[in-house]
């Protein structure tokens, strides 16, 4: 039977989806535009990286061919290798381009309801929500109350937050309420408690996530977010891959923010590190210990939070190359019957306007010692991933999706 390893490269989309225009993203292409920018020298940064995008190990899994299949364009420097795995691309059917929508659909539970969003105006939050949050959390008030980039809003309001201890509340094009507060002056536990209150208040509004964004520093230019971010999500729909694996008594390890995304429901042993490389290390530790029939579900978030939202092409490219260099370790740690999938949950094109996610196809790359190389083509829902892994792990099938393995 072997084990299943599922790695989500957060925001690493591979070309605009057919409905991208409805989300304001017609023409977005995270991987394609990064590759093109690097080929033009626009991804160069002294001391970080230079030259064309170099992803030899991902390309051997079929990344370049998956990108070309998605967009109809051959990406520069990719697609030359003969694939050693299954390769194709997935189309998200969930009604959103956010983290829960993508991850839940990957796990076999597409989002079939409309998320609640906050309007792009100031103030962004309904007066009733703000008043209840201030009253129940005994706050002196809030700062922000608008759509904003997380790093920019902390620079704008961080000093006032330290003077007043009013938390910084902001949102984006996603269904989210984010709350930033100083980890020491405001207190980490107090921030988490505040987010729990906000989570309850946001439930009737169908807001997907409330996110705690702790930061440190004493003045503008010195503020930095810490790794102790915590997401408070609506519970995922029933019948997802986690639930089926848990009911079958399987060994489950969730790496990174996976536990938060799935509201800690059937997510097994949850482990979290400071960054992508720490999460790769944790995935390798899980591969050394998880029992046959087990599931390891990994989220690598740095692509999204550190580089996509900040529209940093060279940083994003370097982050992709850093993961690519770790792939041989991951493959070597897998047992002969294991099956791995590398995919993404949405896009976040660093060449795009604004600072939000982009509605895109995502690459789907399947690999393992027993895999016979083959294209898997266009997958009409990301739930095909869960259905395939269910087949591999001999779990009951889900309601959505089709397996690409027999």
Image: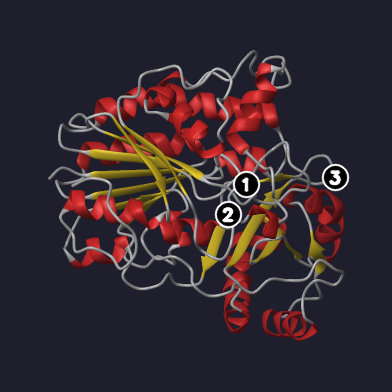
State the CA–CA distance, disc 3 to disc 2.
20 Å
**Label pair 3/1, CB-CB below 8 angstroms:** no
Is 138 placed above or below 347 here?
A: below
User: Residue placed farthest to the front in the image?
Assistant: 72
Counting residues from the start of the chain, the first of labels 3 and 2 encountered is 3
Q: Is residue 38 left or right of residue 287?
A: right
Report which quarter residue 208 is drawn in.
Answer: bottom right
Find numbered disc 3 in the image and state the secondary structure of the residue it sits on: loop
State the residue in front, 197 or 365: 365
Q: Which disc number belongs to residue 220?
A: 3
Q: Which residue is mark 1?
A: 226
Is 183 placed above or below 373 here?
A: below
Q: Is residue 162 left or right of residue 337?
A: right
Is 77 placed above or below 154 here?
A: above
Report which quarter residue 242 is drawn in.
Answer: bottom left
Find numbered disc 2 in the image and state the secondary structure of the residue it sits on: loop
Residue 252 visible in the current orientation: no
What colouring does the structure picture have? secondary structure
The N terminus sits in image quarter = top left
Residue 312, x across and y down, in percent:
71, 33
Neighbour tally class for label 2: few under 14, some 14-19, many 20 plus, Cα within 10 Å: some
State the CA–CA distance, disc 2 to disc 1.
7 Å
Q: Which residue is mark 2?
A: 229
State the residue in front, 376 or 383: 376
**Label pair 2/1, CB-CB below 8 angstroms:** yes
Q: Which disc number belongs to residue 300?
A: none
Report the residue at 19% width, 48% height from top: 392
Report the residue at 66% width, 17% height from top: 39
């Amino acid at each position: 039977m072997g084990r299943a390893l599922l790695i989500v490269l957060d925001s690493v989309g591979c070309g605009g989806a057919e409905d991208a225009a409805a989300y304001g993203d017609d023409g977005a292409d995270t991987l394609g535009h990064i590759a093109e920018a690097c080929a033009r020298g626009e991804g160069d940064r002294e001391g970080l990286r230079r030259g064309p995008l170099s992803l030899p190990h991902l390309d051997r899994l079929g990344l370049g061919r998956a990108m070309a299949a998605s967009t109809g364009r051959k990406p520069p420097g990719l697609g030359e290798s003969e694939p050693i795995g299954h390769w194709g691309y997935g189309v998200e059917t969930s009604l959103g381009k956010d983290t829960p929508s993508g991850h839940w659909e990957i796990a076999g539970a597409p989002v079939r309801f409309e998320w609640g969003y906050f309007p792009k105006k100031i103030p962004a939050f309904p007066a009733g929500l703000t008043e209840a949050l201030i009253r129940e959390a005994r706050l002196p008030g809030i700062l922000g109350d608008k759509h904003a980039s997380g790093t920019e809003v902390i620079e704008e309001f961080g000093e006032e937050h330290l003077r007043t201890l009013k938390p910084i509340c902001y949102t984006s094009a996603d269904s989210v309420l984010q709350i930033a507060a100083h980890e020491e002056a405001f207190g980490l536990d107090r921030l988490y408690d505040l987010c729990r209150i906000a989570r309850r208040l946001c439930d009737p509004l169908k807001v997907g996530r409330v996110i705690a964004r702790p930061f440190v520093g004493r003045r503008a230019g010195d503020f930095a977010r810490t790794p102790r971010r915590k997401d408070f999500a609506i519970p995922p729909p029933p019948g997802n891959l986690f639930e089926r694996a848990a009911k079958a008594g399987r060994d489950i390890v969730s790496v990174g923010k996976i536990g938060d995304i799935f509201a800690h429901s059937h997510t097994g042993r949850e482990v979290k590190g400071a960054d992508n490389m720490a999460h790769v290390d944790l995935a390798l530790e899980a591969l050394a210990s998880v029992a046959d029939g087990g599931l390891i579900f990994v989220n690598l978030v740095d692509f999204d939070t550190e580089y996509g939202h900040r529209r940093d092409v060279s940083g994003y490219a370097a982050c992709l190359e850093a993961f690519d260099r770790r792939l041989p370790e991951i493959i070597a740690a897998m047992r002969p019957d294991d099956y791995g999938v590398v995919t993404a949950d949405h896009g976040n094109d660093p060449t795009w306007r604004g600072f939000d996610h982009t509605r895109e196809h995502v690459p789907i790359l399947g690999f393992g010692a027993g895999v016979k190389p083959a294209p898997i083509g266009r997958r009409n829902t990301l739930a095909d991933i869960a259905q395939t892994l269910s087949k591999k792990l001999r779990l009951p099938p889900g309601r959505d999706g089709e397996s690409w393995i027999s």
